[in-house]
């Protein structure tokens, strides 16, 4: 009987164990980048944070030309685009301070994503003023309300992403409270609300949290990108911290092939592959340029960098990255799908 009990109490949700996770990143974490990270070995990819007010007003539209599901606002702007390739691996991160809005969003996206995450780590003014992000860390009542309501309403796993608090005990207490709401996992950024990303991550605190074994849900360690130079560093950190999974933001932004077991590829190859996804999924030029500049960061002072920054369209970006033919073929194919579906020509 004792053994059986141990087995039950020690069982841990395996959807978030031993996983390499792409962290939520505003602007970076749109569909092309998520697909790129999945292609190079990430197991789970988080969307950028989307604020509940914005998503709640969107309509869910099936896009038959791109084969995507789009959440589109009244101006026609695509707030979230996803597709079948990532269906079982993508987690939508929301910014919220209100259980009703959070639940409405869960209902809107429940068939299209594999999980919902609440951001409790954003220190930006607009988040804090709206009672979101790190503002939630001081409101255990609000955390309980939102997370309990989401868990109750959702068929898919619900998680949240927090920062460490000022002491280990306070952080452990918060984790116990979050666990009691029924969430499937928690990501922990090893910096306090007042610490910036330039300061060292408190890996020793993350280690103490994991070694306390105070909760029975997977703990996902985050904040270690400055300690990760190659793929092997990820598993070394996971072992040394004792976390169930690792979540990377800036290391993936620098080079998404950090997730690749067999070694990293050049920034140029990553940028080309990224652009292919951006073309295939009709990503906006502005977002594509932003992501390519980040992926190509160390090459931006070279000749190719000036070609990229002086581009003004997806075609010019494609020229800069030697993908003109790929771009032209993709556009021709898209036009032909569009005409076969509507009987009209699209220019
Ligand atoms: C972030 N971060 C972040 N966190 C979050 O919960 N939601 C978000 O939308 C964003 N956006 C974002 C954009 C960019 C460009 C960066 C660099 C970071 C924080 C991020 O997920 C992570 O917690 C920190 O960057 C620490 O992890 P790394 O970078 O050391 O792996």
Image (cartoon, helix red, strand yellow):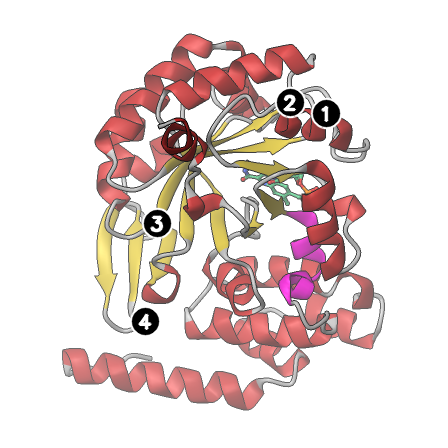
Q: Does the residue labelled 3 lie within 8 Å of ligand 1?
A: no
Mark 2 vs mark 4, foreground winner is 2
- Label 3 – label 2 distance at C-alpha: 26 Å
Rendered location of residue 46, percent (x, y): 48, 48
**Residue 257 vs residue 100: left or right?**
right
Question: Magenta span covers which residues?
Answer: 249-260
- Establish if 98 lies above or below 331: above
Q: Which mark is residue 66?
A: 4
The answer to whether the residue labelled 2 contacts the one labelled 1, judged by CB atoms less than 8 Å apart, is yes
Find numbered disc 1 in the image and state the secondary structure of the residue it sits on: helix
Give me the residue at 57% from left, 41% from top: 244
Nearest to N terminus: mark 2 or mark 1: 2
Q: Does the residue labelled 2 lie within 8 Å of ligand 1?
A: no
- Establish if 342 lies above or below 87: below
- Label 1 – label 4 distance at C-alpha: 45 Å
Give me the residue at 28% from left, 87% from top: 336
Q: Which mark is residue 164?
A: 2
The answer to whether the residue labelled 3 contacts the one labelled 2, judged by CB atoms less than 8 Å apart, is no
Q: Residue 114 carries which label?
A: 3
């Amino acid at each position: 009987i004792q053994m059986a009990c141990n087995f039950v109490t020690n069982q841990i949700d395996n959807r978030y164990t031993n996983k390499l996770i792409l962290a939520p990143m505003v602007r970076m974490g749109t569909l092309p980048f998520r697909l790129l990270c999945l292609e190079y070995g990430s197991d789970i990819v988080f969307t950028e944070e989307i604020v509940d007010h914005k998503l709640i007003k969107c309509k869910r539209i099936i896009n038959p030309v791109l084969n995507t599901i789009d959440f589109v606002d009244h101006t026609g702007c695509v707030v979230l685009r996803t597709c079948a390739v990532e269906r079982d691996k993508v987690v939508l991160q929301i910014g919220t301070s209100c259980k009703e809005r959070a639940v409405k969003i869960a209902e809107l996206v429940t068939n299209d994503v594999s999980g919902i995450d609440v951001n409790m780590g954003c220190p930006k003014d607009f988040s804090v003023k709206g009672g979101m992000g790190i503002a939630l860390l001081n409101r255990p009542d609000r955390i309980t309300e939102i997370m309990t309501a989401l868990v109750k309403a959702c068929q898919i796993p619900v998680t949240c992403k927090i920062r460490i608090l000022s002491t280990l005990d306070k952080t452990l207490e918060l984790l116990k409270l979050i666990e009691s709401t029924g969430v499937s996992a928690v990501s922990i950024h090893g910096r306090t609300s007042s610490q910036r990303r330039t300061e060292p991550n408190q890996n020793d605190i993350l280690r103490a949290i994991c070694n306390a074994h105070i909760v029975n849900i997977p703990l996902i360690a985050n904040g270690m990108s400055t300690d990760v130079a190659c793929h092997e560093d990820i598993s070394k950190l996971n072992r040394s911290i004792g976390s169930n999974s690792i979540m990377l933001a800036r290391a993936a932004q620098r080079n998404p092939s950090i997730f690749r077991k067999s070694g990293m590829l050049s920034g140029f190859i990553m940028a080309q592959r990224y652009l292919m996804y951006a073309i295939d999924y009709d990503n906006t030029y502005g977002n594509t340029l932003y992501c390519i500049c980040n992926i190509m960061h160390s090459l931006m002072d070279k000749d190719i960098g000036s070609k990229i920054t002086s581009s003004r369209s997806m075609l010019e970006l494609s020229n800069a990255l030697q993908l003109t033919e790929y771009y032209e073929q993709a556009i021709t194919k898209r036009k032909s799908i569009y005409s076969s579906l509507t009987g009209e020509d699209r220019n």
